[in-house]
Image (cartoon, rainbow, N blue to C red):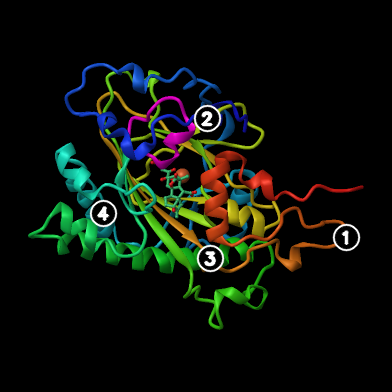
Amino acid sequence: MPSRLSDAFREVPVHLRNKDHLDFESIREVPDSHTWQDVDDYPSVDTAAVGGVPVVDLNDPNAMKLVRHACETWGVFQIVNHGIPMTLLQEIEAQGRRLFSLPAEHKLKAARSPDGISGYGLARISSFFPKLMWSEGFTIVGSPVEHARQLWPDDYTQFCDVIEEYVKEMKGLAGKLMWVMLGGLGITKPDLKWAGPKGDFKEASAGLQLNSYPACPDPNRTMGLAAHTDSTLLTILYQNNTSGLQVLKDGSTGWITVPPLPEALVVNVGDLLHILSNGKYPSVFHRAVVHQTRHRLSAAYLYGPPPNTQVGPLEKLVDLDNPPLYKSVTWNEYLETKAKHFNEALGTLRITSTT
Ligand SMILES: C=C1C[C@]23C[C@@]1(O)CC[C@H]2[C@@]12CCC[C@@](C)(C(=O)O1)[C@H]2[C@@H]3C(=O)O
Ligand SMILES: O=C(O)CCC(=O)C(=O)O
Ligand SMILES: [Fe+2]
């Protein structure tokens, strides 16, 4: 990924940019603060030409093979028959809508603090770009109670109950997906000690990111969420019925849209799985573009290892012909590296061959 978009541009710290919380509902044209020059940095690719992002039925007896192929060639796939009730997906969407439709001053009561992780705010990667993004986000790491109380003092449990249930279900699904994805590389439970004695990833950590992309009068001149990889092992994304997620497939010439499919979830490979798999499953660059008339919502479940566990290339995937390509790192350390180096973070861990 070229770095020209990510040249660090640090002016007003993001937390001071309350003036930049646009009232998206009423605005009739894209202001200069949100006008992007590079939306068409790569062309959009007609999926008919390359085939679309793979869709895997988790009940398919060949699921492991299909997932392996998708991870190796795309870094992203959609899943159906994943076991998450449709009603829960509808509920998380409804809570997202409820949250983002609050007036701006009200949402700012739950603003992410300057050095905090959780809360409402602009995309945290905003500090790497000269222009702001056409989106708002709400990050939940740990309990959402304090922020929910600030938003709905008399009725915060509704939101918290849905989040709790969603995160619980996603954690179970993420653990299953880990074994399907790693199983494709011949990795089994004894190969991954930190998955715990039962291999249930009990100590795994995670975050939930609710994203809102309001309809935009001139969608081709702005950006919903700029191109990035996730720092995770894997991310499970629910998107409502409005398209916007695009991925860069290795070897293809441009952005490929991941169409919203009823009842499907999108799974993408993050940087830590890239490292763990010694580069066999590359993390995927993705971004979100916006729509002229439709409000788009997404919920990204960001799944990682226990925060202080060292993650490096799996021994089974390393030998004389396949030397380790990355240094080990903990998720906490990697998040710090990402916050500093953004899209160059993975490169800072690359082991350069001396031969
Ligand atoms: C667990 C996390 C991954 C994330 C940083 C965070 O602490 C919480 C938000 C996550 C998110 C979501 C949008 C894209 C992203 C790059 C960002 O800026 O915030 C990811 C972070 C990440 O994967 O590095
Ligand atoms: O909204 C989307 O489709 C993408 C969201 C995303 O990439 C993220 O939250 O990390
Ligand atoms: Fe992402």
Residue hosting label 3 = 305
Span of residues in magenta: 122-135
Label 3 with label 4: CB-CB less than 8 Å: no
Query: Disc 2 on helix, strand or loop?
Result: strand
Q: Nearer the viewer, residue 150 or 76?
A: 150
Does the magenta segment cover residue 51?
no
Q: Is residue 289 above or below residue 35?
A: below
Which one is in front in this view, the residue at disc 3 or the one at disc 4? 3
Disc 1 residue: CB within 8 Å of ligand 1: no
Label 2 with label 4: CB-CB less than 8 Å: no
* Residue occupying the point 53% across, 26% down: 45
- Corner quadrant of residue 86: bottom left
Residue hosting label 4 = 92
Residue at mark 2 to residue at mark 1: CA–CA distance: 36 Å
Residue type, numbered disc 3: Pro
The earlier-in-sequence mark between 2 and 1 is: 2
Disc number for residue 320: 1
- Could you tell me residue 355's position as x and y percent? 92, 47
Residue at mark 4 to residue at mark 1: CA–CA distance: 47 Å
Residue hosting label 2 = 255
* Residue occupying the point 62% across, 58% down: 65
Residue type, numbered disc 4: Ile
Residue at mark 1 to residue at mark 3: CA–CA distance: 27 Å
Q: Nearer the viewer, residue 265 or 346?
A: 346
The earlier-in-sequence mark between 4 and 1 is: 4
Query: Disc 3 on helix, strand or loop?
Result: loop
- Could you tell me residue 339's position as x and y percent? 51, 46
Q: Is residue 190 above or below residue 12?
A: below
